[in-house]
Image (spheres, rainbow, N blue to C red):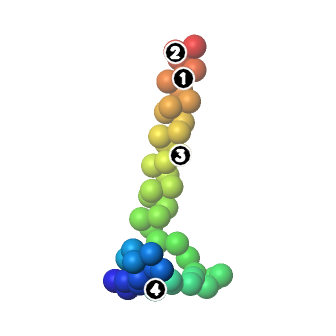
Amino acid sequence: MQVTQEDGGRLNAFAKEPRMVVMEAGERSTSSNKLLLLGGVVLVLALVAVAARIS
């Protein structure tokens, strides 16, 4: 962690950031991402069905 001192004597601590990973345009998403997306779609559809049933 990098710590700097301001003019007023206060300390500022900066977190150590992980390196960014840049995906190429042709890379495919993993099956876990597809499963998570499908689960989200099912959840949204279930919530819409419950809201329609209540009203």
Q: Earlier in the sequence, mark 1 or mark 4?
A: 4
Percent of width and height locating residue 16:
39, 82
Query: Circle 4 sits on which residue?
Result: 19
Q: Which residue is mark 1?
A: 51
Q: Is residue 22 above or below residue 50?
A: below
Q: Badge 2: how crowded within 10 Å, few (<14), some, or many (20+)?
A: few
Q: Amino acid at mark 2?
A: Ile
- The reply to whether dot 2 and dot 3 touch (C-beta < 8 Å) is no
Q: Residue furthest front?
A: 8
Across and down, in percent, residue 35 comes to 44, 58
Callouts 1 and 3 close, C-beta under 8 Å: no
User: Left or right: 48 with respect to 30?
Assistant: right
* Mark with earlier residue (3, 4): 4
Q: Indicate the secondary structure of the residue bearing disc 4.
A: loop
Please name the residue that numbered disc 3 is placed on: 41
Separation of marks 1 and 3 at Cα, in angstroms:
15 Å
Residue for badge 2: 54
Q: Amino acid at mark 1?
A: Ala
Q: Element at badge 3? A: helix
The answer to whether marks 2 and 1 mark residues whose Cβ atoms lie closer than 8 Å is yes
Mark 3 residue crowding within 10 angstroms, few (<14) / some (14–19) / many (20+): few
Residue furthest to the left in view is: 1
**Considering only order in the chain, which callout, 2 or 4, is on the residue closer to the N terminus?**
4
What type is the residue that disc 4 sits on? Arg
Q: Residue at x 49, y 61 (%)?
A: 34
The reply to whether discs 4 and 2 touch (Cβ–Cβ < 8 Å) is: no
Look at the image and tell me in which quarter the N terminus lies. bottom left
Q: How many marks?
A: 4
Tell me the CA gap for discs 2 and 3: 20 Å
